[in-house]
Image: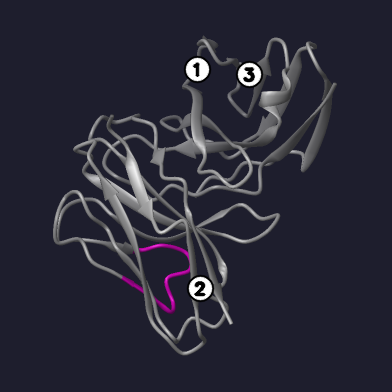
Amino acid sequence: DGGITQSPKYLFRKEGQNVTLSCEQNLNHDAMYWYRQDPGQGLRLIYYSQIVNDFQKGDIAEGYSVSREKKESFPLTVTSAQKNPTAFYLCASRSRNENSPLHFGNGTRLTVT
Amino acid sequence: DAKTTQPNSMESNEEEPVHLPCNHSTISGTDYIHWYRQLPSQGPEYVIHGLTSNVNNRMASLAIAEDRKSSTLILHRATLRDAAVYYCILRGSGGYQKVTFGIGTKLQVIP
């Protein structure tokens, strides 16, 4: 079945360490997105990518980095510069069709202590 | 970005219809209205979208005001599985644009 896979589901890190969250899709989608969600809050856009080797900052990009070397993959690195990294991270993708819906993964819950 | 406004929370009795409102007074002529819902500890899932005309699918109906400044997601018979956070967002046409979400409406379904 096609879909988006985020791994791992839960991730624990010590403060000061960089950590990379995986997002892989086999839907042949061009655009991919990373969102952050805090308890009781909506989704906030971190980065998005329209095509391979291209990406744009979202609303809260500071302390994060991404790469898009392959169409299927859009990993997110949470760096030590991110002051409050503990959150639920969601990856999404969509196709080229103008009004195609976003397809989301089931998220990675990151806890930094 | 054009913004949407939704109530923070709503309640509904099981097996009754639910009308979830969304205001988008600054919507542009080419913005589509999309609805998603998010179950606890899961990613959001697409529900429905429309531009001007009312839309129906197997999950829900979308009623769009004539001036397009508001819309309503209608669940015809709420079930316990419909308890989720519902997001109303606007999507511009043309190209890949950033897609932003608000806080949404938390729907509680009472047995």
What residue is drawn where x is 20% and y is 61%? A68
Q: Quadrant of residue B69?
A: top right
Q: Give the left or right position of residue A49, taking residue B26 as reference.
A: left
What residue is drawn where x is 81% and y is 17%? B14
Q: Residues within 10 Å of mark 2 (few under 14, many from 20)?
A: few
Q: CA distance from mark 1 to mark 3?
A: 8 Å
| Residue holding disc 1 | B52
Q: Residues within 10 Å of mark 1 (few under 14, many from 20)?
A: some
Secondary element at tag 2: strand
| Range of residues picked out in magenta | A57-65
Q: Position of residue B98 (x, y in %)?
A: 39, 51
Q: Are marks 3 and 2 in contact (CB under 8 Å)?
A: no
Task: Count numbered badges in the picture.
Answer: 3
**Considering the image in quadrants, where does the N terminus of chain A appear?**
top left
What residue is drawn where x is 73% and y is 39%? B106
Residue A60, numbered circle: none
A56 shown above or below B56? below
Q: Position of residue A2 (x, y in %)?
A: 27, 32
Q: Chain of mark 2?
A: A
Residues A2 and A50: in front is A2
Q: Chain of mark 1?
A: B
| Residue holding disc 2 | A12
Name the main secondary structure of what is drawn in magenta.
loop
Amino acid type assigned to the residue bearing label 2 in the image: Phe
Dot 1 or dot 3, earlier in sequence = 1
Given this view, does label 1 or label 2 mark the residue nearer the observer? 2
Q: Give the left or right position of residue B76, taking residue A12 as reference.
A: right
Q: Quadrant of residue B92?
A: top left
Q: Chain of mark 3?
A: B
Given this view, does label 3 or label 2 mark the residue nearer the observer? 2
Residue B65, numbered circle: 3
Amino acid type assigned to the residue bearing label 3 in the image: Ala
